[in-house]
Image (tube, helix red, strand yellow):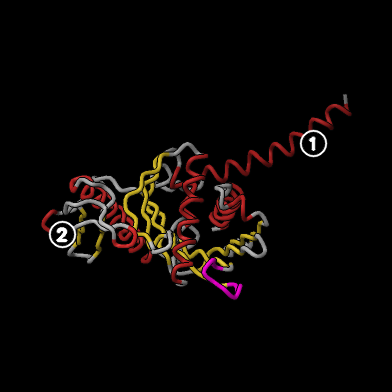
Amino acid sequence: MKRLAREELDRLVVEKEKVEADLKVALLPKDPNDDRNIILEIRAGTGGEEAGLFAADLFRMYSKYAEKQHWRMEIMNRHYTGIGGFKEVIALIEGKNVYSKLKYESGVHRVQRVPTTEAQGRIHTSTVTVAILPEAEEVDVHIDPNDLRIDIFRSSGPGGQSVNTTDSAVRITHLPTGLVVSCQDEKSQHKNKAKALKILRARLLDKARDEKMTEISEKRRVQVGTGDRSERIRTYNFPQGRLTDHRIGLSLYKLEKVLEGEIDEVIDALTTYYQAEALKA
């Protein structure tokens, strides 16, 4: 009986520690945006055409991840580079806990590899910026129609080719803030306008959150979204097949799998780290 009790005690001690840890996490203030859908924005940074190609690689990575999570992705707007990359691509991702899982992806993503356009075989460093914005509802952000300037123009595709022959592309300028959103992915002017307003609403909500967090930055440094987006958060090193997240010092030597959407290990490690930081605070 003593032996059985000892075995059970060892098991229960481990179980008790896990329950206590789970309880502490459960008591943390919940991010009100965790259950929201997101607007994903990916833009080529420094590095010219190579940055555009890597922007396309990152978009594919997030698309694959969304597919594995059974989320729905809808492209809102995209601007191609000359050789098949993206200057910018914006997408809506809908599903369970989308913001909760992807909120730590905002920042500068750096790639080190030999570009296909490089004849000398030298490694180049390029950057791409990623922004994760919680989707805003109309009740979150009131937009006065009088504050908007709406311009209609003709859509253009890769290489300057016309996407359609009608003036259906929409550019919306929010006059009080100067925010500008363009959308040309749909053939319908009304659909492009609706998508542009959705992106604008998300950006206005994000701007309001950033301003609020700036006021109380010291108190909320460890919480979601307080990081400076200009910081380099991650490096994708192709010669070494390595991904490194600089915020938590995590290195994984399976870059090929990561770019196929297998990013659970990174996302779980980031979530654990920020939960631990919040517990310390």
Q: Amino acid at mark 1?
A: Asp
Q: Which residue is mark 1?
A: 10
Q: Amino acid at mark 2?
A: Asp
Residue 128, image x, y percentages: 46, 64
Quarter occupied by the N terminus: top right
Name the residue nearer the viewer: 247 or 14.
247
> What predominant SS class does the magenta segment belong to?
loop
User: Considering the numbered disc 1 on the image, is that residue within a helix, a strand or a loop?
Assistant: helix
Question: Quick check: is 239 in the magenta stretch?
Answer: no
Q: Are marks 1 and 2 in contact (CB under 8 Å)?
A: no
Q: Is residue 213 left or right of residue 177?
A: right
Give the mark toward the camera: 1 or 2. Answer: 2
* Residue for point 20% across, 62% down: 173
Number of callouts: 2
Residue 116, image x, y percentages: 54, 66
Residue 126, image x, y percentages: 50, 70
Q: Which residues are magenta?
A: 115-123
- Up-down relation of residue 191 to residue 105 (above or below): above
Name the residue nearer the viewer: 25 or 166.
166
Q: Is residue 213 left or right of residue 238?
A: left
Q: Is residue 223 visible to us here?
A: yes
The image's mark for residue 233 is none
Q: Spatial distance from mark 1 to mark 2, Cα to Cα?
A: 69 Å
Q: Which residue is mark 2?
A: 151
* Residue for point 74% across, 34% down: 12
Q: Quadrant of residue 254?
A: bottom right
User: Considering the numbered disc 2 on the image, is that residue within a helix, a strand or a loop?
Assistant: strand
